[in-house]
Structure formats: C-alpha cells, structure tokens
Image (tube, rainbow, N blue to C red):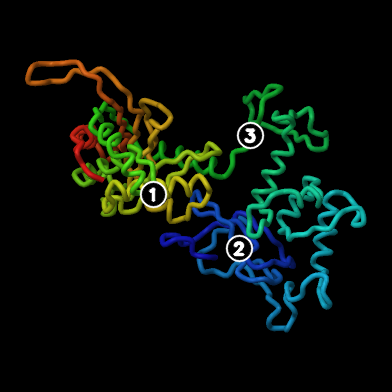
Amino acid sequence: MPKLGESITQATIIKWLVKEGDHVEEDDNLLDIATDKVDSEIPSPVAGTVKKILFKENDVVPVGTVIAIIDTGAAGGEPEAESATPGKPGADTTGEKVQQDTLQAAAGRKPSEEVAASRFYSPLVKQIAQKENISVTELESSKGSGRNGRVQKKDILRYIEERKTVSGKAVSASEVPPQKQEIITVKPGMQVETGDEIIEMDRVRRLTAEHMIRSVQTSAHVTNMLEADVTPVVVWRNRVMDEFAKKEGLKLTYLPVFLEAVVKAIKEFPVINSSVDGDRIILKKRINLGIAVALPDTNLIVPVIKNADNLNISGLAKEIARLASAARSNKLRPEDISDGTFTVTNFGTFRNTIGTPIINQPQVAILGIGTIEKKPAVLETPEGDVIAIRHKMFLSLTYDHRIINGAYAGAWLRKVADYLENFDQNRTI
C-alpha cells in the first residue's frame, strides 16, 4: 500500500481492477483506493502475473503493507511479455489471442467474425465491455486518456454514457431492452411516479452527506452576518489586475485578498482556528485554509492551502489556482485535502448574497463569502453625510457555540470586515 501523503497512514481498498492469474503491464492500474474524499488508481510498478491478492475490497490497510504479489518471471527465467515483437520469429502472441477472443466473446461473436485488437485493454475495461456488449471495433474507435492512448475505466464509462444518448436526448426507460431494466425499491413512504429518475449517490456524495450530518450532530451551529464595504478592494483589483496577469500568468480574483484578511483576523482571535477534543480546546498553531470547490459533477471538495499565513496575495492566488485546477481535473493528492484548520466557502461566485454554511469537522468555524454588489450607501464627510455608490458584500460566519460565543465570533467577523474596508488602494503587487 503506497504512502500517498505525509499525514496518510492507511487507505481503503475500493475495488480490485485485476484478479489472481491476470497478466499486467507496468503502469497498468491494479486497484482503486480511497483516503477521505480522494480516490486514487494505483498502477503496477512492474510487468508480470498477479499471483496473490492479500486483502479484500473495503479492507482498510496501513501504508507499507504488502497487498498483492506479482510474479515478474525473472526468477524462473521466463520471457517477459514484451520480449518479442508480434509478427517476428519467436514472438509470443498468446496474450493478444486471449485478449482478442475475450473481447469478441464480450460482443457475442465468434473469433473469426471480429477484427483483432491493436492495443492492450485492462481486465477491468474488458469486463465492462463484456457486460455492456461493446465490440472490439467499438473499443478500437474509442479515445483513451491513458498512457499511449490506453483506454481507462473512465474512458469506457464515458463512452457508455454517450452511447446511451440519442440525438442529444437521454434514452428513456421505455427504450431500454427489457433485460436491461431493473426493479428499484425505495423505502416505505417514498413515492416514485412514472418518469421519475432515480440516481444512486456516488461515493463522494455519500461521504459528503455523512460528513454534513455528523457535523450538525456534533457542533452547536450558530451564524453571524454582516455587510462589508469592499470598495477599496474592488478599486485596487481593477487597477492592478492587468499587471498581475502579465507578471504571474494568473487572473487576479478577490479571494486571495479575502483570505489574507481571514489570516490576519485569526492571528488576533486564535480560538477561531481550533478544534474540540471532548472537554479540551486544541488551538492550532498552523493556519491551513480549506477552500470549498464545486466540481463539474456537482460534488464538493475542500482542498487546503497549507501555512496560509506564510503567503502573500500572489502566493495565495497561485495556491488557489493550483488546487482548484487539480480538484476539477481529479488530480488532487491526499495531502491536498488534509489538515485544514479553517474553511472558506465563496458562494458569491454564483451570485448568491448570504448563506449559512455547515462547519467542516473537526474545525469550529467556517466563513461564507457572498457576491459583491453596487449599493447606495450613506458616507460621513467633513461637509456632512452624502449618498454614494459603494461595493458591498455580506460575510457570514458559522461557528461552534460550544466554545465560541456570539461576542467572540462577532468581534472576529468585524475584524475581517475592518481589514477589507481599510484595504490600501495604493498597495503594489
């Protein structure tokens, strides 16, 4: 079991992609494992035959533990699968023939009725092809995202979904052959009408649901809100955004500025950056900011900016961009989502004004950032009060009332707003 991060000590085997007796090439995926919300495919470090699988699916295994044995054939002097080139004298085409026959059987055809496969397909891909009646010809024409264009699990699943689509419209239940229809039961009292669609939660959705319910059952949730005048931040960003893009190669958003204010306020109110262990409060020395990121599949994940107090606005912007990109392309590492001490969720991205986020356990608070809107506001000037157009934004802090009272939470939230309202418009990047 590989070590996938500094703080990762164990992982759960979600699915074996091979079975005992299968031949694997180097870098073929052996199994799917999970640590918290991150699923990872583990490739084979060598080519050989899977002799023994030592753990079952759903087993939790410590890192460094042997989970499978692969015979490379080196000890017995057996030739490796790629030692000869197909078509040349001495070439061993047995593996190709087995693969070809397997794929042809998947499509319900005899070997003589189908063309040969020109590339390698993993046991999992072949299994899915057999289950879905996908022929060799279809597989050969499908585009793979793996090494050397190899078709991976996600590629064939995407192909299956596309194949189920007719003229841009999802295939209805009535169009599915009778043998493909399933009888779905729901719990008593749950009404399902004709035309309703039942969608099974994926693993990330189930984990998120469990995490949210556990948080509500653990912490006494209370939310404070205020409206901040962020006009200085807007003016500054408009002034430097082109220079920043040219210098850093990134689009400058408001979020790095907000995170800087969060870090400054946490240093003055350290209980916001803590966790609860029974009757004890653990004040965290490091300030690791989790940033809620919406994924293309509508799921949510929270990558973490480690030691955010050591980064300036440029450094924060780079980390936000890196983590958001990795999250949306499913390339987050386990360490990228671990050890968060405080979370920020920016629902203002979706032009939402106010929200009451749920605490990300085991943390004790979470900040919600709303959209920035132009509003008329009363300003005090030496000549008297005037009405001016200002850029306003709501901040909402949900906190654990077991250890944080309203006065402390309100003071912290006010401090964040003060930093934003007094932001130096002449600041350089």
Label 3: element kind: loop
> How many neighbours does mark 1 have within 10 angstroms: few (below 14), some (14-19), or many (20 or more)?
many
In the image, taking residue 266 as reference, residue 357 lies left or right, namely right
Query: Can residue 404 be seen?
Result: yes
Dot 2 and dot 3 residues touching (CB under 8 Å): no
Picture quarter with the N terminus: bottom right
* In front: label 2 or label 3: 2
Residue 409 position in % (x across, y down): 24, 35
Q: CA distance from mark 1 to mark 3?
A: 30 Å
Picture quarter with the C terminus: top left
> How many neighbours does mark 3 have within 10 angstroms: few (below 14), some (14-19), or many (20 or more)?
few
In the image, taking residue 254 as reference, residue 89 lies left or right, namely right
- If you read the primary sequence from the N terminus, does the residue marked by circle 2 or circle 3 appear first? 2
Label 2: element kind: strand
Dot 1 and dot 3 residues touching (CB under 8 Å): no
Looking at the image, is 154 positioned above or below residue 1? above
Which residue is identified by label 1?
304
Looking at the image, is 409 positioned above or below residue 321? above
Q: Please tell me which residue is depicted at 43% across the width and 29% down the height of the picture.
A: 350
Q: Which kind of residue does numbered mark 2 sit on?
A: Pro
Q: Which kind of residue does numbered mark 3 sit on?
A: Ile
Taking depth in this image into account, of 298 and 65 the one nearest to the observer is: 298
Looking at the image, is 180 positioned above or below residue 6? above
Which residue is identified by label 2?
43
Label 1: element kind: strand
Q: CA distance from mark 2 to mark 3?
A: 30 Å
Which residue is identified by label 3?
199
Query: Can residue 278 be seen?
Result: no
Taking depth in this image into account, of 214 and 197 the one nearest to the observer is: 197
Q: Please tell me which residue is depicted at 31% across the width and 38% down the height of the picture.
A: 400
Seen from this angle, which residue lies furthest left? Answer: 382
Residue 319 position in % (x across, y down): 37, 50
